[in-house]
Amino acid sequence: MEDNQTLLEILKFTLPSVIVFLTAYFVIKNQSEENLNKIRIEIQRQNQQTVTPIKLQAYERLVLFLERISPQQLIATHSHPDQTAGSLKFQMIGAIQQEYNYNLSQQIYVSAQSWNLVKVVKEQVIALINEAYNGLEPNATQTDLSKAIIESMIAAGQQPTVIAINYLKAEVRMFFGSTYLIISL
């Protein structure tokens, strides 16, 4: 009987202590989780403030890349009097490749679909130049190649670079809203 009474005395002191301990544990745990969530939200907000401008800049750079590799821009930039068609072809394809290599890192910040579209358009423009060149006489001039490229573009109806630029603009609208689009692009 004395063992039971000793056990009851021990329980009188330990049971309230255990209850206080468990209550304190759960209150502190709950507050810690709330604080951790607040910290996560703040870190996400700060990351968003850093990443969003970089991401938007990547879209801008890809639009600039597509503008620079548009056939009419390539012709205007790289054709010179007394130049052969072969020389113009070489310079235009070299410029496309150089611009592409310069913008490779932008794929990190845009969607996979956008980046794949940019790669496909680059290849289409190169193919357009090669096809136009292959249809020329061996002693053709840069004027002959320029005409052949423009005629191919007119026959195709719409330029791949324009389609890609419109896609990138639509993606920017989707990610950032139309307000960003007006300001940045």
Image (cartoon, rainbow, N blue to C red):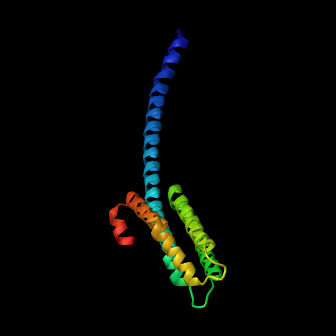
Residue 168: image location, x then y, percent: 44, 63
Above-or-below relation of 179 to 136? above
Taking depth in this image into account, of 71 and 14 the one nearest to the observer is 71
Taking depth in this image into account, of 90 and 132 the one nearest to the observer is 132
Residue 20: image location, x then y, percent: 44, 33
Image label count: 0
Taking depth in this image into account, of 82 and 74 the one nearest to the observer is 82
Is 66 left, or right, of 98 in this rendering? left
Query: To which quarter of the image does residue 145 belong?
Result: bottom right
**Residue under the image location 47 percent in, 34 percent down:** 21
Q: Residue furthest toward the front?
A: 137
Q: Does the image show residue 110? A: yes
Above-or-below relation of 165 to 43? below
Image quadrant containing the C terminus: bottom left
Residue 154: image location, x then y, percent: 45, 70
**Residue under the image location 47 percent in, 33 percent down:** 22
Residue 131: image location, x then y, percent: 60, 69
Above-or-below relation of 84 to 108? below
Taking depth in this image into account, of 100 and 172 the one nearest to the observer is 100
Q: Does the image show residue 54? A: no
